[in-house]
Amino acid sequence: MKRYMEILAFCMLFMAFFLSGCSLSPTNMGVLIGTNLALSGKGMSYSTSTERGIELAKDMVNDRGGLLGRPVQIVSVDNHGKPEDAVAAIQQLTVRHVSAIIGPDLTDCTRAVLPNVEAVKIPLISPACTQPDITVDPKSHEVYRYIFRAAYIDASQGRAMADYALKQLHVKRAAVFYYPDKTYAQGLAEYFRSAFAASGGEVPVYIPVEEVQDLTKYLSLLQRENVDVIYLPGYDDWTIPAITLLRSHGISQPLLGPDGWNGPKMERDVDTSYLTQVYYTDHYAGHDASEAARRFSQAYYEKYGEWPDSYAALGYDAFMMTAEAVERCQSAEAPDVARELEKTIDYDGATGTISLDANHDAIKDVFIMTFKDGQPELAATIPKDRQTQ
């Protein structure tokens, strides 16, 4: 009977240990990094690439011994591209005691989780969000302590494109058409207009256009105002038909856009003849941009059998920035990692050399991409110091 009671007590102790969240499994001996991405639903095409970049980075870190002498494991939660599911994902990742969270990519999902992340004190680094208000409270102007990003902000890419248009395309008069119900498009439109005007250019045409077909109403206006460049901020679902309409109506001026043009749909769905003098800002310029980009690109190709896109590169950089922070502070405790992420300076990544500023925003070069024979090609690099106009 005594032996039976001893065995029963041991079993109860084991169950209590297990239910408390502590497992005897060796898999819990690693450093856990969470991901909160849209692996289905809205944004899936972006986040699938992001996840691939993260997985590659994890494999590379583990191949060289992991972090703090332990393997790194990814705890992946699908937010389905829905803000409410992104919030639920934070709760799941908190229970798993992750050291940091990568994602969401989508702005509305990221905005939704801000109070939760600040409350649980786990650093979150968004790979691809470019709108300014995810790291800084727009009302109080206070920096969110636990929110970071690997992407530059919209102000940087709007100003970079204005700089390129004025100094390298040598244009003076610009038209801006933008989708009116998207914060992304409106913000970019204003950043471009302000920078273009501040550097001596003129923007006589600045018009919100919801229905792409309505652009036909302004074709004669472009001619009357002697416009020599057109900026079309927005995602590819709006800008692809806009480019097609303008080119099919004989508009031959350079067409400019943001990082929302960087998906494969542009190459696939736009007639190659229409892509002449088309330029857009991007985070990743391919394997020829730097040695770090070349290493990443080759490793990605070896793992997946295809070349990476910008979202894969941003996911890779978000993970590697986090890994470097863990190594520097020699801790996997989330608050320690957050404090160390704030100190990120000159991280040499696939998307460029990144430093985080006081707002936790990535300060780095902006790449201007164009098309050659229907394929993206680097046209220019706009350095950090020319994005502050």
Image (cartoon, rainbow, N blue to C red):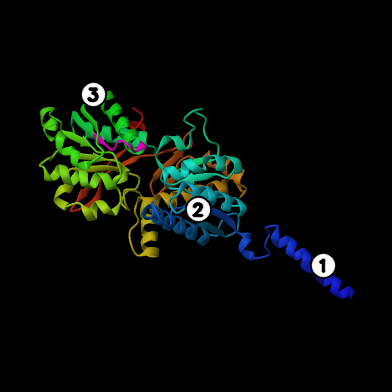
In space, the residues marked 2 and 1 are separated at their CA atoms by 38 Å
Left or right for 118, reference 385: right
- Confirm or deny contact between disc 3 and disc 2 (CB under 8 A): no
Q: Residue at x 26, y 25 (%)?
A: 197
Whole-percent x and y of residue 116? 56, 42
Q: Nearer the observer, disc 3 or disc 1?
A: 1
- Confirm or deny contact between disc 2 and disc 1 (CB under 8 A): no
Q: Amino acid at mark 2?
A: Thr
In space, the residues marked 3 and 1 are separated at their CA atoms by 81 Å
Q: How many marks?
A: 3
- Confirm or deny contact between disc 3 and disc 1 (CB under 8 A): no
Q: Which residues are magenta?
A: 177-183
Left or right for 19, reference 363: right
Q: Amino acid at mark 3?
A: Gly
State the residue position of label 1. 9
Q: In the figure, 117 relative to 141: above or below?
A: below
- Does any portion of residue 383 appear in the rendered image? no
State the residue position of label 2. 35
Tell me where residue 128 sits by quadrant: top left
Provide the secondary structure element on which disc 1 rests: helix
Q: Residues within 10 Å of mark 1 (few under 14, many from 20)?
A: few
In space, the residues marked 3 and 2 are separated at their CA atoms by 44 Å
State the residue position of label 3. 200
